[in-house]
Amino acid sequence: HEALKVGDNEYASFGAHFYCAQNILCGSFLPTVEAECTALALKMLQLNQLPSCLTHVSNHLSVLMLIGSKKNPFQVFNGHMNSEDELLQHALSIGRFSLAQTIYFNRLFVAFFFKRYEEAQKYAGKYLNQYAKLNIANHIFYTGLTEFYFARHSSNSKHLEIGHESLSSFKTWATHSTWNWENKLLLLEAELYFSKGEMEKAEEKYELAILSARRHRFVHEEGLANELSSAFHTANSNIDKAKSCISEARTCYEKWGAAALVELIDSHGN
């Protein structure tokens, strides 16, 4: 609003884009975020701010996938840009690496929540091939979780090493901001201990990660911690605890407004 008051439409549009992006990562109620994304995309185009709108539409698509909507966010471009694949090719062809990186991160983020781990790993790697470093902390978080998953399903020690690197970054960051990073650090530690077979330590860290996410109001990450804890308890044949955790995850995703994730849990009979 302040930028618009002084006529700086470009800064105002980038500010609106980052506002929506942070709302997604902070666990804001997704249907509300989606409505804001729609309104802001139209406003950006009205102000002739195409670069901001092109970046913004990838975030909007992520929201739509999480809420299970078939709406096409690219329709605002009236046929001039029709899909995220087309947008990615456009970004790479003109050297807009920050736009390409935004797309790669969003694909990593969505793929991990939908348990498409190979896809998550693919886009985590593509993200690092770009020069920009947007959303670097969140990229490191979801990369670490992805690599710990593969560490438990592969004999390749590389996965554990990458997971360790992610965890080390969060140990540093958590000393500067407990609110933003503590729950993520705890969840990475839980996944590390699970991957190493240290089950008592893993169970404790999962519980702490859930409590920290709840205390700091990251409802989506509270859901994620419960979901990963459920997988841990399933692997250890603690079926009652696994069911309790996945039920809590479902409740959190419902609060987040991520209807597609609720549906995915329900489809597995939980």
Image: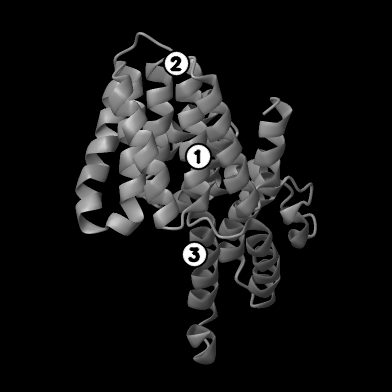
Instruction: Name the residue: 48% across, 31% down.
Output: 228
The residue where tag 1 is placed is: 224
Q: Residue at x 26, y 23 (%)?
A: 161
Question: N-terminal of the two: label 2 or label 1?
Answer: 1
Measured in 3D between alpha carbons, the distance from the residue under mark 2 to the one under mark 3, in whole angstroms, is: 41 Å
State the CA–CA distance, disc 3 to disc 1.
23 Å
Foreground label between 2 and 1: 2
Farthest front residue?
240
- Colouring used for the render: one colour
Q: Position of residue 229 (x, y in %)?
A: 46, 30
Residue nearest the observer in this picture, 132 or 249: 249
**Tag 2 residue:** 236
Residue lying at the far top of the rendered structure = 155
Q: Amino acid at mark 3?
A: Phe
Q: Is residue 100 visible?
A: no
| Position in image of residue 147 (x %, y %) | 39, 26
Label 3 CA crowd tier, 10 Å (few <14, some 14–19, many 20+)? some
In the figure, is residue 7 to the left or right of 184? right
Q: Nearer the viewer, mark 3 or mark 1?
A: 1
The numbered mark, 3 or 1, whose residue comes first in the sequence reads 3
Give x and y (percent) for residue 100: 51, 46
